Image: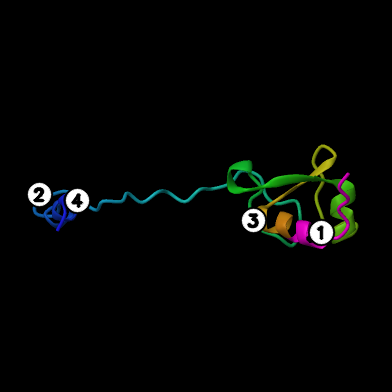
Amino acid sequence: MGFKANARKHRESRGEGEDKKKRPVKEGATKCGIKECDNWSDKSMGGRSISLQNAQDVWGDGSYVERKGRVKVCKSCYRAWKKETKDDMEYY
């Protein structure tokens, strides 16, 4: 046994708790702009912002909520958009 394994072994006898503290679950502030989706579109949770034209191409008219000329999407919706438009991308 090494030093750290020995220390972990005797941690409970010294009165110390678990070695990992549980983090509180993050609560988002802005909902995803796609109406069927209930996820959060905060930047800290992987959310992105796409243009209205890009959102319209994938989800059609009326199935998204616009904010300042753009649509805030969660990480999973962004990945869905990225996958749908993968063949349309042109690189110069």
| Three-letter code for the amino acid on which mark 3 is drawn | Asn
The disc label shown at residue 14, or none? 2
Say whether residue 69 is visible. yes
| Three-letter code for the amino acid on which mark 1 is drawn | Lys
CA gap, disc 3 to disc 2?
43 Å
Percent position of residue 5, x then y: 18, 55
CA gap, disc 4 to disc 2?
15 Å
Name of the residue lying farthest toward the left:
13
Majority SS type along the magenta span: loop
Task: Find disc 4 in the rendering and name its residue.
Answer: 4
Residue under the image location 82 percent in, 42 percent down: 70
Which region of the structure is painted magenta?
80-92
Query: Which numbered mark, 1 or 2, is in the foreground of this view?
Result: 1
The answer to which of marks 1 and 2 sits earlier in the sequence is 2
Q: How many marks?
A: 4
Task: Find disc 3 in the rendering and name its residue.
Answer: 39
Task: Find disc 1 in the rendering and name its residue.
Answer: 86
User: Label 3: how many residues lie within 10 Å, few (<14), some (14-19) or many (20+)?
Assistant: some
